[in-house]
Amino acid sequence: MAHRDSDAVGPVRIAVAAPDTADGAQPTDDVIHRSRLWLESGQPRPPGLAYRDKPLDGEVAFVFTNAAMAYPGMGRELAEAFPEVAANTQRLVPEIPFDHTGFGRHTDPPQPLDQTTAVTLHSSFHVSLLRDLVGVRPDVAVTFCSGEISALVALGLWPDQEELYQRVMSSPLLNHEIAGDFSAIHRAWQAGSVDGTRWVSYFVGAPEEEVRAAIAAHPTVHLMSVYSDEACVIGGEEQACTGLVATRFADRALPTRFDAAAHVPELEPLHPRLQQLFDFPTKDSDLRIYNGARPGHYTPNRERTARAVADQMTGQIDLRTATNHAWADGVRIFIEVGPQSLCTDSIHRTLHDRPHLAVALDTRDNAAVSQFHQAVAEIAATGIDMDTANPTSGDSTTAMTST
């Protein structure tokens, strides 16, 4: 660092992503000064800086979060910084608005298909930034819940987004069977002589074993999905579910604010219809997709993809499974796209001290442009191949130093 060598190689790496200076020059001298104060004097790390004492070798995964992470205004600040990329993303589905509220329609209460579409657009926007401006492309997609649909759209594996949008938004299966009036859920309850009222779901911050033990006596409450050893989602009949939360997890649970059922036994009879619904023209690809519904991964083609989407919609999913298998297969860099950073936090907890980078482009509690700069710096510091000549369309720069 003292020699101020700036290149893309070397055992010690410092990377910065920051706004251009007024004259358009890269802020390398100031970066090195601030880096030394941080690393040598213990001062707080300046924003947009990242350091690694050696490169991180391995494959890159884009991580696609689920629709429950949607929030009003998501993507707005970053889209204002990169309007051309945002406009190109918007053209994927012209019917979905982008304005001062961010990507998608936001209603109260939120509507599941609107949330899913908005998160898909937000994720696609992030993918475009990473791929076209930063120069990072994935070897792998790690998906969680509806993030699988986001991945298939954002990565161009389902090329006819207009047909997809029209089919999904008009589907009685999605609008009435697993959401809306929850016809499929009520049919299952009636067949089991359950006097059910309404479907609800909760995030629970507790170990899986504790949650399974708690729901064992409640046949209408299910473990839907697992994020990490300390976080999962349960769902089921309202009275049973809210009663269980009140007695066992009162200070460790929050409503998901995603009013749809998924990943539960009541939906297993819908598997053939869901597979048919998502039987779209699909680009064959060697990209590996880990969706946590089954061990391992699949590579997309039309039949495998439709079956995989139906599998995860009707069966329990586990982000730990997807993360562990991806890591065992050589993935070391996990970049979360879409709103918030719950998958990133969960990946950190799952991999713990195993070599990896997990970083999110959006954290909601951090300024979006600053978070993007920080994420790009963290990615650059790993030493992966990326186009750093013009990573952010002139709005910011990435400089790297190595010794």
Image (tube, rainbow, N blue to C red):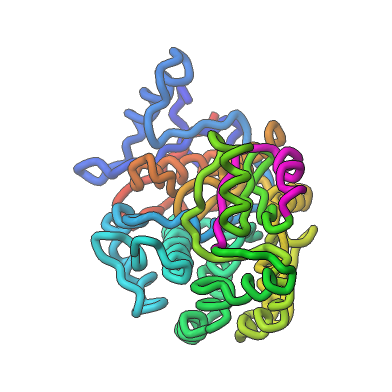
- Residue 365 in magenta stretch: no
Q: Nearer the viewer, residue 6 or 283?
A: 283
Tell me where residue 170 appears, x and y as whole percent. Answer: 48, 85
Question: Residue drawn 69% across and 52% down?
Answer: 223
Question: Residue drawn 62% across and 50% down?
Answer: 233
Tell me where residue 318 appears, x and y as whole percent. Answer: 70, 53
Asked if one can make out residue 270 in the rendered structure from this viewpoint, the answer is yes
Span colored in magenta: 198-218
Question: Residue drawn 72% across and 51% down?
Answer: 218
In this view, 50 is above or below 185: above
In this view, 175 is above or below 212: below
Tell me where residue 300 appears, x and y as whole percent. Answer: 69, 74
Tell me where residue 178 appears, x and y as whole percent. Answer: 58, 72
Q: Nearer the viewer, residue 72 or 92?
A: 72
> In the rendered view, does 257 fall on the left or right side of 152?
left
Question: Residue drawn 69% across and 38% down?
Answer: 207
- Residue 214 in magenta stretch: yes
Residue that protrudes farthest toward the top in the picture:
41
Q: Quadrant of the C terminus?
A: top right
In this view, 295 is above or below 8: below
Q: Nearer the viewer, residue 285 or 112?
A: 112
Residue 205 quadrant = top right
Asked if one can make out residue 382 in the rendered structure from this viewpoint, the answer is no
Residue 370 quadrant = top left
